[in-house]
Amino acid sequence: MIAVSKSQAIEHIQAFKNIVGESGVFVDEEILNSYAHDETEDLHFLPDVVIKPSSAEEISAILKICNQFKIPVTPRGAGTGLSGGALPQLGGVLLSIERLNKIIEIDERNLQVTTEAGVITEVLQDAVKAKNLFYPPDPSSRGSCMIGGNISENSGGPKAVKYGVVKDYVMNLEVVLPNGEIIWTGANVLKNATGYNLTQLIVGSEGTLGIVTKAVLKLIPLPKYDLLMLVPFNDPVNACAAVSAIFMAGYTPSALEFMERDALEFTMRFIDNCIVPIDDDVQAHLLIEVDGNNVEVLMTEMEGISEIVSQFDCGEILFAEDAQQKAELWKLRRRVAEAVKANSIYKEEDTVVPRAELPLLLKGVKQIGKTYGFHSVCYGHAGDGNLHVNIIKGDLSDEQWNGSLKKGIVEIFQLVKNLGGTISGEHGIGLVQKEYLPIVFNQTQLLLMKQIKKIFDPNNILNAGKIFD
């Protein structure tokens, strides 16, 4: 392990095997390589050992050893993160929660579910849907990402615009602290004004304060119907401007997504699907969904939204005719990130501003791109002001890519701050964004965060180097 002799490393690995069994500890290079990266750019860091515990008690025993010998521990869910939060850049232990994969109880009387942290998000959603219940947070990677990772990043997804993000559904958490202690952070109730809110402190803390092993999540009744439409625009700034107008008119879509032309074209090539013909003059699309329990009301809402977007020079609107067409349209949106990554080396910046400022953000991003010579592909959750800015390497030299480009990213983040926003809406800070934190936080704020980290993790073993050094 890190900074220990070979004999000590062998002793530690044997101790881990004694805790989780021979089949739960991996040191062969092929396995280590598969856990050396997540979905963040092309970064790669080998852990010294991968451990797959199956209970909070096993995690507790592992952390007690790591805390005693100051061995770095990187918690990991499914590895779908985009900020380097699951990268073991210090080596040490890569601790995977994938075996904590049981849904413990769906409490229909109280509309809540108790689940282990390694349950796949879509698996949980399908399980509660079978009981006509709904867990709305749905990241694009919902088919592979895990509840624990979602909690660590305070994930959102398309439904956040109407239903909120993960923090709005977490009631209580079982957490293993860096010293191995196991605690519950709150209570299984809808209201709680009892002391500091440890639950919400853990949500979004990116695995730096403790390892979430179980969660009690709020559920809501499943909406019976949804309608979906795709709206083309000749000007992407007009598409962004239409977003705020929809809400100002009194409508709250269940999803409102923005995609630039390049994003849609990349994705259609990537998945070999040309369901959406794109006219030459179309430069952006809004994907708009409404849901509820009364079809007539939803039809009226769609008509009203159609009238609003028509004021922003939109083209012919495509209304999804059936469940299959809805699924195809959503597939296009959910696969954009993969398509962009497959198309080129890229950097993704996860900006968020008040939704009325989206037009200024988009215009500013494009102007900064012209200044620094880079092309960007933008898409995201327009309904809550969350724009993913994908900077494409293209013809940029390595010197530009690794040097002057950072000045452009700084300018984007300064623009975001000036518009009342911040530098991450749902991807987190992790390893790759931490150098930009001083743009949005002053020294007092950063010091408070560092002091909180020190209280939880005085030996700095748990996801060290993430969020800040």
Image: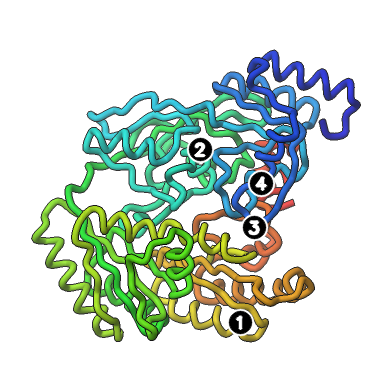
- Camera-side mark, 4 or 1: 4
Tell me which numbered mark, 2 or 3, is placed earlier along the sequence: 3
Q: Position of residue 290 (x, y in %)?
A: 23, 60
Give the spatial CA distance, label 4 vs label 2.
18 Å
Say which element carries label 3: loop
Quarter of the image for residue 303 reads bottom left
Task: Find disc 2 in the rendering and name its residue.
Answer: 148
SS assignment at label 4: loop
Say which element carries label 2. Answer: helix
Q: Which residue is mark 3?
A: 41
Q: Which residue is outermost to the front?
A: 272
Q: Secondary structure at mark 1?
A: helix
How is colour applied across the structure in the image?
A: rainbow
Tag 1 or tag 3, which sits nearer the N-term? 3
Q: Which residue is mark 1?
A: 368
- Residue at label 4? 37
Locate residue 410, reporting x and y percent.
66, 73
Closer to the observer: label 2 or label 3? 3
